[in-house]
Amino acid sequence: MRQIRQNSILKRILVPLLLLVILQVAVLAGLLFGGGVMNRLNQNSVDIINERVINRKNYLEDEMVKRWSNLDSALNGINQSAEKLKTDDAKKFSRIDSDSSVYTGLLDESMEELISLIRQNMVTGAFVVLNTKDLSKEEESRGYQNKPGIYIRDYDPVAAPSENNTDLLAERMPSALVKKWKIGMDTGWNSGFDFKDSSVDYYSFLYEPYMAAEKYPELKTADLAYWSKTYTLANNPKEVISYSVPLRLSDGTVYGVLGIELSTDYLKKLISFNELSENKNSAYILGVQDGGKGNQLQNVMVSGPAYNMYMKQSKTINLVASKDYDNAFTIGGSDADLLCSNVHYINLYNTNTPFADQKWALIGVVPTDQLFSFSNKFNKTLVIVVTALFIASIIGVLVISILITRPVISLASDVKNSNPSEPIALRRTGVKELDELGGSFEKLSSDVFQASRKFAQILRMASIKIGGFEIDWNENQLFMTEDFFRVFRSEKIRKNMSIEEFTENMEMFRRYVSRKNEQDHIYIFEIPDREDLFWVRLSIRYEEDKIVGLAEDITKETLELKKMEYERDYDLLTNILNRRAFNARLEQLFQKGKDVLGTAALMMIDLDNLKFLNDSYGHDFGDKYIQKTAAGLKKYTPKESVVARMSGDEFFVFFYGYDSKDAIRKKINHCWSKMDEEYLELPNKQKFRLRMSGGIAWYPDNTDDYTKLIKYADFAMYKVKKRGKGRYGEFDRESYFQDAYLLQNKEELNHLIEEELIEYYFQPIIDVKTGETFAYEALMRSRLDSIPTVYEILSLAKQESKLYEIERLTWFKSMESFVDLVQSKAVKRGTRVFINSIPNQDLDEKDVERFELQYGEYLDLIVQEITEEERGNRMMQAKKEERMHRWGGGIAIDDYGSGYNSEHLLLSVTAQYLKIDMKIIRDIHLDRNKQQIVKNIIYYAHERDIRIIAEGVEAYEEMQTVVKLGADYIQGYYFAKPSLLVQRIDEQKKKRLLDLQS
């Protein structure tokens, strides 16, 4: 057999290819490096862009300096109102940022000025913020405080203003002014600037000019003005910049800031980037440079797509002078895609002013392919020439390649026709390198075949069943792992099959597809297996000539997901729908409309006697009572009805799809009568009947909005419970509107309880002998304007049977505030705290355990105040006394002498402290009868080792009299008013008290 001559493929192609490449490089170098014409063309383009940016900069500077920042008229008007307020009542003016009765009036007078600013200056917003505190101290201590003010917006200032200001939206404004001016509230509206409540840093538009006015009182107001960088208000993503000036009286008092805002969207409309390039794909950057040095700027606004397209909306740019062009910059030193104009500064501040170092600049950004489009066209001509030369080279390479590629084609054919399921066996070509490559293919194929077998064995050992396949349409071949159909739990399908057989077998499972994602080509199969189900996920990827698929057994994760969904949608105690799932179900039904709903009714149910059961037999029997009710509602209502537990003792039943109200009433009557027969067996074998009250609202007669339907059913139930328990009634629209105020306040009360919208102020109780603070009384304050007083809170809570919730808030919130003061060292350790308990209300065992666990080390400092209203429940009174004794605390009788049976309470309660009512203390130095009463009380109390606290002492003469009569402690405005942060006792007043002892 003739030996095939072997030649190196390198020798056959290397020499001619090298000759061709050398020729191409020589021609290309001569064309590209022959002169500097392209650089000159590019520099002309850069100069044109700079001229356009300068023109736009001049326009923007004129608008910012002459129009937008013209606040003189509004500033004078507001200052005049403030001056008058201070002149009339300086003490009242001092509460301008804390007393709503003070600042609401000033803000009301400022509204006309703010609206005029928006209209005349054509800006997107105007604001005023009031403050008289030291912002720097609050900033350093992170003790942010809420600030009153107004912030209104007009998102389209160019449009003609409406006569009644309906085009304006309130971002920050007291609710009283919103109602008065009938300004619409934006989605992020708040009654003031809630820095404390939302832990938001002071906005720079407030902090910077205000602190500058404090630091440089000699400067004019205009020189203290500040242009802020972009910011967003809390709960509003709209980015804006602002111009603000300090509000300052003639005597130098700084009491806030006034300013305007400009949204970045509005600025983008004014700064058109289309003028920079013909393709409208450029950008303007409005930036700020702090310190006035270097070329690093912070983006304020980007108008145009070019910057974001390449820089991914970066907020900071570092400009580096271009190495190739004059008066041009690159971003970060790379000019492959973008080229910037020179930095053109906008003159906003006078020299030697607080913010003179903050420089604003306008920069033009143009993609280099657009900026140098002319030179690029010239460059393309060169490319055509090079391409023609390259094509000639390719033809030469092809002629040479034909002579040597036949062995390569032969090798490729063998590889192509090989069986992918078996190791490759290739014919020898006679070319040394190709035969070596073929041998490597064979070895690699053998290794891969062995590795795939091992990998398949590993997959079979894994806890998750998995299999795959690949269809090659060009080769008309199917590759499939041995376990692919085992994932589908089909053992009868053989491994080796054609594409057609594979497709037929997969069609068998098509009917089990339960979910699919056509976009990502993911299919979920839900397949029965004897009595159970199993789930398979099939993921398919379509390539140019192939289909690749992966099948996974996802039964375990599917079952876990279904369990999570059940726990999300169902009440764990009763196994019926919870509030979230009920609302979602009703939303689905109401979207289908009257065709599905027909005549429908929502019945809201409230369990009667649950609190009695919890208190008498424990929460376990209360839970059984709730479970029994849920089971009965499911049992005695039609299957299609929607039954849900909304909260502790509230249930909803939704009847729908009926032809008339009477048909639903029959179902409700049947359910109600059956529920009356149900009972819970108590430990003493006594049968405790299920009792509930309910309210019904009708669809569509009452409303076609399910949220209102819930409100109406709630109101109907509320009316029933007012008349008596154990019944149900239907919604009455006339009665609803008569009680609208009560209903609204009921919702506000629920909001107050759920969000814990109360806080506690503390008033010191002074020891007469030492002049030191012996204790603090915790006094509740509401954070809701709609129910501002404690009296209103307690009245509503009593009417809505929510007194227990208020009692729980009283204990936990007052102690939380007190412990914070102790831990911050604002209150000395060992100081007592007096807590006002609501008469005839007491914490249940669970809450007591939680309270003891949370505040165990402070229990002996607590003194619980009770009043004569407590005497009606002797058992609860004794329970409170026992707990205070166990904690090591004390009992104080509050408001002694204000009622008719104070003596009876004193005899029935073992108290350590007695607080004489302020009505007796008031003007006691002028009334001998009062002095005799107090003298008798003190004598009686001291005989029984009870300490006396004189409440409501406001004058020195009153203090002098009660000390002379023998009072042990003093509480009142004379020493300190109740405050959120405890106040230090005036040393002069302390000295006067101690002088009385001598």
Image (cartoon, grey):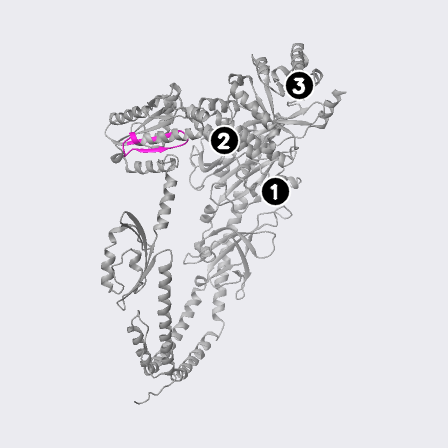
State the SS at label 1: helix
Give the residues drawn in magenta, as a range.
635-655
Q: Residue furthest top?
A: 929
Q: Are marks 2 and 1 in contact (CB under 8 Å)?
A: no
Image mark for residue 863: none
- Amino acid carrying label 1: it is Leu
Q: Is residue 106 above or below residue 153?
A: above
Q: Which mark is residue 224?
A: 1
The image's mark for residue 945 is 3
Question: Of residues 784 and 485, which is closer to you in this image?
Answer: 485
Disc 2 target residue = 846
Q: How many marks?
A: 3
Q: Is residue 426 left or right of residue 866?
A: left
> Residue 21 in the image: x percent, y percent?
42, 79
Give the CA distance from mark 2 to mark 1.
58 Å
For this orientation, the residue located farthest to the bottom is 2
Q: Amino acid at mark 2?
A: Lys
* Residue 218, image x, y percentages: 67, 40
Label 3 sits on what residue type?
A: Asp
- State which quarter of the image contains the N terminus: bottom left
